[in-house]
């Protein structure tokens, strides 16, 4: 793939934000990667160019029928100024799977990975040095063909934008309180729950707002058919430690196959722990909590890595997990994954890619 590179003149570069107050997604860097797909022609006109607005026809199909998919990964700055990516090819392969589900074109994963590395390299001064801060990477694809019929578009735009983000836990772990919803569902069997497609997030906002209004940080989703089996928490996969066994719901088609989830499963198996990928009912969790057998609950995802759950609220009942404190497995997984991501620790599974 030939990439045209057009750089911002040195005098026009943006001022770098204060690294101690980055927040999430508030700042964008100086450049972005774009390429266009046309049916019959494939991907073409790959370019790294100054970050700028797009011009879209008001009839662009993404605006009406929602053919939009995305990914999220990070660049980490290790010691000696080295920059690392964590399992980038897994994100790009997953993006192609999301594309297939949404009748969008696959991306050339290997070439996009090279383009991504080139972009991050150009923007390396944007990879934060502050403890725990990272450069968030957002590959996205949208249908840009103008037309008002419901069918797969013939034209797409793929782009990668970058955003320096602050540490998720600036003051150390803060276990979250979770609202278990039995009124809203995230995904249904046969639907698009296992694709990282924009509509899933639009559909999830209402439950999140209702939970937050009642003082909870996140929503725990139950399966859509029985409203009984646990699926995910917010936009994270979920794990339980029950009687020393590590349990997570199986990839049934309605949950997103998280790369952090997969990494956690591998680490926990490396450590010789018993792991089960099986359906787990919310009643089983509550009973285990009442009988003192529920040891830990945590979410997994790129943004937070590990998000310990301190309490669950379901149908008028509240249950505390590990006295509202971070459990030992949550802490060990967080430390281990961060150690690998920042290049401080051995990486036996070859997860990191050095720029
Ligand atoms: C992105 C995402 C996750 C986490 O995936 P990671 O690859 O671990 O970042 C989990 N659930 C949903 C719904 C997601 O969108």
Image (cartoon, helix red, strand yellow):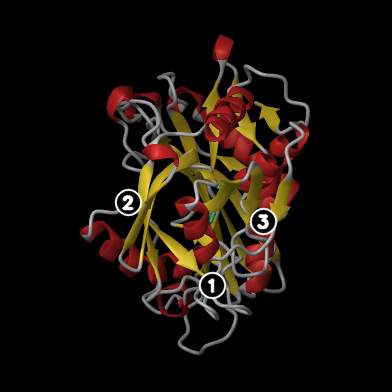
Report, in whole angstroms, how far the alpha carbon at label 1 lies from the one at label 3: 22 Å
Q: Which residue is mark 3?
A: 94
- For residue 41, which quarter of the picture? bottom right
Q: How many marks?
A: 3
Under 8 Å from ligand 1: the CB of mark 3?
yes
Q: Is residue 290 visible?
A: yes
Q: Residue at position x 67%, y 41% from top?
A: 263
Of helix, strand and loop, which one carries label 3?
helix
Q: Residue at position x 36%, y 29% from top?
A: 13
Report, in whole angstroms, how far the alpha carbon at label 2 lies from the one at label 3: 27 Å
- The residue positioned farthest toward the front in the image shown: 291
- The residue positioned farthest toward the left in the image shown: 213
Q: Residue at position x 68%, y 46% from top?
A: 262
Mark 1: few/some/many CA within 10 Å (<14, 14-19, 20+): many
Disc nearer the start of the sequence (1/3): 3
Side of 240 where 217 appears, left or right: left
Of helix, strand and loop, which one carries label 1?
loop
Report, in whole angstroms, how far the alpha carbon at label 1 lies from the one at label 2: 20 Å
Disc nearer the start of the sequence (2/3): 3
Residue 123 x, y percent position in the rendering: 49, 30
Task: Please tell me the numbered disc located at residue 298.
Answer: none
Of helix, strand and loop, which one carries label 2?
loop
Side of 119 where 348 appears, left or right: right
Disc nearer the start of the sequence (1/2): 2
Side of 323 where 259 appears, left or right: right
Q: Which residue is mark 1?
A: 223
Mark 2: few/some/many CA within 10 Å (<14, 14-19, 20+): some
Residue 97 x, y percent position in the rendering: 69, 63
Q: Pick whichever, 262 or 122, lies toward us.
A: 262
- The residue positioned farthest toward the bottom in the image shown: 149
Q: Which residue is mark 2?
A: 217
Q: Is residue 103 above or below residue 156?
A: below
């Amino acid at each position: 793939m030939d990439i045209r590179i057009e750089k911002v003149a040195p005098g026009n570069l943006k001022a770098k934000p204060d690294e101690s107050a980055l927040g999430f997604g508030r700042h964008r860097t100086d450049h972005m990667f774009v390429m266009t797909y046309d049916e019959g022609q494939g991907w073409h006109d790959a370019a790294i160019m100054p970050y700028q607005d797009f011009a879209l026809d008001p009839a662009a199909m993404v605006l009406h029928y929602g053919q939009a998919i995305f990914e999220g990964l990070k660049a980490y700055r290790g010691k000696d100024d080295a920059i690392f990516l964590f399992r980038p090819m897994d994100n790009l392969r997953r993006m192609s799977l999301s594309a297939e589900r949404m009748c969008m074109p696959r991306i050339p994963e290997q070439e996009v990975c090279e383009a991504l590395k080139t972009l991050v390299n150009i923007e390396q001064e944007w990879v934060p040095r502050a403890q725990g801060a990272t450069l968030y990477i957002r590959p996205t694809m949208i249908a840009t063909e103008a037309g008002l019929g419901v069918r797969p578009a013939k034209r797409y735009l793929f782009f990668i934008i970058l955003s320096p983000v602050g540490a998720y836990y600036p003051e150390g772990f803060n276990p979250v309180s979770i609202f278990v919803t039995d009124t809203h569902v995230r995904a249904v069997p046969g639907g698009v729950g296992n694709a990282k497609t924009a509509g899933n997030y639009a559909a999830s906002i209402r439950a999140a707002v209702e939970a937050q209004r009642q003082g909870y940080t996140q929503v725990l989703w139950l399966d859509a058919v029985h409203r009984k089996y646990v699926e995910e928490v917010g936009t994270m996969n979920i794990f339980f430690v029950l009687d020393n066994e590590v349990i997570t719901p199986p990839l049934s088609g309605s949950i997103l196959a998280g790369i952090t989830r997969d990494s956690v499963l591998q680490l926990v198996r490396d450590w010789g722990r018993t792991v089960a990928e099986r359906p787990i009912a919310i009643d089983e969790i509550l009973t285990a909590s009442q009988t003192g057998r529920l040891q830990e609950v945590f979410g997994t995802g790129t943004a937070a890595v590990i998000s310990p759950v301190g309490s669950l609220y379901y149908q008028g009942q509240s249950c505390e997990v590990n006295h509202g404190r971070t459990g030992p497995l949550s802490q060990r997984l967080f430390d281990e994954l961060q150690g690998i991501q920042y290049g401080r620790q051995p990486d036996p599974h070859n997860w990191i890619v050095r720029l």
